[in-house]
Amino acid sequence: MKGAAILLGAILMASSSQNGARAGETLASLDAAQHTQSLVDRASQDWLSSEWRSYAARFVTPDGRVVDNANGGISHSEGQGYGMLLAVKAGDAASFETLWRWTARTLAVRKDHLLAWKWDPAVKAVTDTNNATDGDILVAWALAEAAKRFHRPDYREAAVVLARAVGSHAILPTPLGPVLKPGLTGFGASEQPDGPVVNLSYWVFPAFASLAALAPEFDWAAVRHSGLALIQASRFGTLGVPSEWEGLASGAPRPAANFPAAFGYNAIRIPLYLAFDGGADTRIALEPFAAPWGQTASTTQLLQAHEVPVTVPLAQPGYDLVMATARCVSAGTAVPPEMINARSDLYYPETLRLLSVIAIQERVSACL
């Protein structure tokens, strides 16, 4: 309500030269506008709380494990981070605690304080101790948000530990600027023929302000800047979108040699994170995504029309809502109402749907 407070101050100053009746009418109008906004905010929160309860019932176990039901029912640090973020945005302190306790108890097995990325229900154990840097960032961001909303300093302490671990181990200096390693092993210059290899969807742009507050000894602004530069330089095919994985050995991003040159379930998050950030520079970076998607509401149809390879079909409504959000933030195109409530029965596109709505609510509510 900062803008409303500034407006109220201006009204009070102006009222000194007006008659009391006119000032009273103005203040009454402002009160009505604030009341309307309060009702809108409450309705948005109620909607999100209801959607979160449905999401948790389908994808979260009673002990706090987020289930990737399109991927063998595994759980991973990314999913735990998403679940924790949705819980705090919905104001569900109890579920957040349950999610965090499962994450800390099960995935925090590394000595460097990063999280193991994969837990398999078939063996009821971590089956890959490599980290996933985006999962680490998501969990740290969610902890920081929960610390503020639920008044839990212990959450902030945990977030600081994780943010410092990401800063210490996952940031790699390169001639193109500091980049994020997707994981600590498997992607370096000595491990890939065109390494280092990066995944541009691992730049969780709306989280960088929290990371900077948690671990200010690291240059998160430079990491953010390099991510934006790489996104704008990473264009392949007639659609001009980034490939899932990019090799940096040539001095410029190129589709990585040992990975499919495709736009898929990883890359679809790039426009979501840009839109969620809401900065002027991220809006500029969104423009190449928003313009072609303005031709159709279907992500799948557009990719097929431009013969862009995909790693998995992007036919779920959550994917289309991501691109509609990108169009709205970049060009002011309203989001079709039917997209907001189009649920999916799969964990990942349903997660992207809810994150897209949260991004709209927090950054550009006029899109709704």
Image (spheres, rainbow, N blue to C red):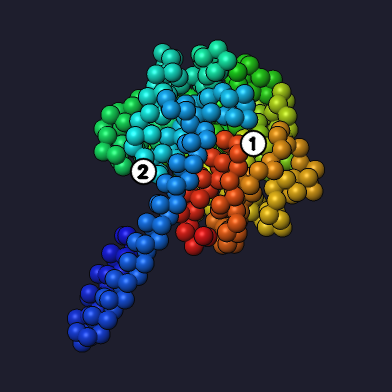
275 displayed left or right of 243: left
State the image coordinates of residue 304 (x, y, percent, origin top left): 78, 45
22 displayed left or right of 205: left
Give the mark toward the camera: 2 or 1. Answer: 2
* Residue carrying label 1: 265
**Residue in the picture at 43% in, 14% down:** 109
Q: Nearer the viewer, residue 200 or 47?
A: 47
The local secondary structure at tag 1 comes to loop
Vertical relation: 37 (above or below) 72: below
State the image coordinates of residue 156 (x, y, percent, origin top left): 31, 32
Alpha carbon of mark 2 to alpha carbon of mark 1: how far? 28 Å
**Residue in the picture at 68% in, 24% down:** 194
* Residue carrying label 2: 91
Q: Nearer the viewer, residue 253 or 15?
A: 15
State the image coordinates of residue 180 (x, y, percent, origin top left): 52, 29
N-terminal-most mark, 2 or 1: 2
Give residue 215's quadrant in the image.
top left
**Residue in the picture at 29% in, 71% down:** 31
Give residue 189's quadrant in the image.
top right
Query: Are there few (<14), some (14-19), or many (20+) residues within 10 Å of tag 1?
Result: some
State the image coordinates of residue 235 (x, y, percent, origin top left): 69, 42
Vertical relation: 111 (above or below) 194: above
- Answer whether residue 258 is visible to the viewer in this image: yes
* C-beta proximity under 8 Å, tags 2 and 1: no
**Residue in the picture at 56% in, 26% down:** 182
Q: Amino acid at mark 1?
A: Tyr
Give residue 154's quadrant in the image.
top left
The local secondary structure at tag 2 comes to loop
Q: Amino acid at mark 2?
A: Gly
Vertical relation: 265 (above or below) 15: above
Q: Which quarter of the rendered picture does the N terminus lie within?
A: bottom left
